[in-house]
Image (tube, rainbow, N blue to C red):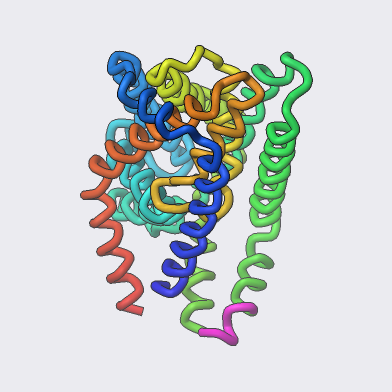
Amino acid sequence: MPNVRTLLFLLGGTIGALFLLLAARSVDWADFARLIRGAHPAQLVFAAICLLCYYGVKAERWKHLMTPFARATGRELQPVVVAGLAGNYLLPHFGEIARAILAGRKFGAPPSAFMGPIAIERFFDFLALLAIVVVVLVPLGGIDRDIRAASFAAAAFCAILLAGVVLFLLRTEACIGLASRMLAPISRKLAKFVAYHLRHGRTGLGSIGAPWLLVKIFSWSVLMWLTVLGCIEFSLRTVGAPAAFAGAVSVLLLSVVGLALPAAPGHIGTLQLAFTVGLAPFGVPLETAFAASVVYNVLMVVPTVLLGLPGLRRAGTALHERFTAR
């Protein structure tokens, strides 16, 4: 496990550094410094309000995803959700494991039961994002090549994830058997461990069979992305960029697709490239886009890590105990 974490950290750091280099290679640093010094605090306050709304909406959506097997309020889930987000910033994709561990402890269920809802969450993330792209960007016509490519990538990821979930639902035992046979030569204990958690993970996919629940989850997903778009939009306004909601949608799409790859801690580099590439077709100067990306990066990461660190520590301790016990 530590070796895998180290490898992902190094790979993400390398990709992040490359993306940061690509985003910053032509930046006029004097102009960038001027934009940061002239930032508008009031707009940053509005961005922070959108961030708090994002925490709440994400927790509410997860509440509905858990409905088939666990009952909770959005308020109860908020600390768990924020801890998961903090984990994703410190070690991308680790936060989802931390969220499942904390939820498992809170509700007395195996963490794997909560990985099913998280998998469905990813599907609705991409589906809702694509819906926003279709509504906002497609009517503009002549969508930039990079944005079009990112849209296709999001659609492909959405389709693959849905196909995987459906296959697992229809052929659960066959999928578990295949995983066990592949892992048995490595470690029989590991094979049994994975099989056990896959069976419990099947429980967490119950929302797939409730159409009314899927509508709610999709609606909360759209609302969640709108709060993130608010964070992007007000980050742009903080550095004096012209209001361009379509540009914010473009940035969001590129950043989400980019984060499907290993990323550096804090998503540094990935976000900077998403801002500079995503805003270029909308006439936003490079220095302004880069300054807005820095504001957004600090806004999203620093409060989230500070608020989520206590829960993240508990999740790390539980994960360590789990693997040392094995």
295 magenta-colored: no
Q: Position of residue 237 (x, y in %)?
A: 42, 16
Taking depth in this image into account, of 235 and 22 the one nearest to the observer is 22
Q: Residue at x 45, y 46 (%)?
A: 267
Say whether residue 149 is left or right of residue 87.
right
Q: Toward the viewer: 200 or 46?
A: 46
Note whether residue 60 is visible. Answer: no
- Residue 304 figure quarter: top left
Q: Residue at x 43, y 27 (%)?
A: 31
As displayed, is residue 256 above or below residue 199?
above
Question: Residue 244 lies in what quarter of the image?
Answer: top right
- The extreme bottom residue here reads 185
Q: Does the rendering let one see residue 223? A: yes
Name the spot of residue 96 as percent of width and height, x first: 43, 51
Residue 183 forms part of the magenta stretch:
yes
Q: Is residue 136 above or below residue 102?
A: above
Q: Quadrant of the C terminus?
A: bottom left
- Farthest residue toward the right? 142
> In the image, which residues are magenta?
182-187
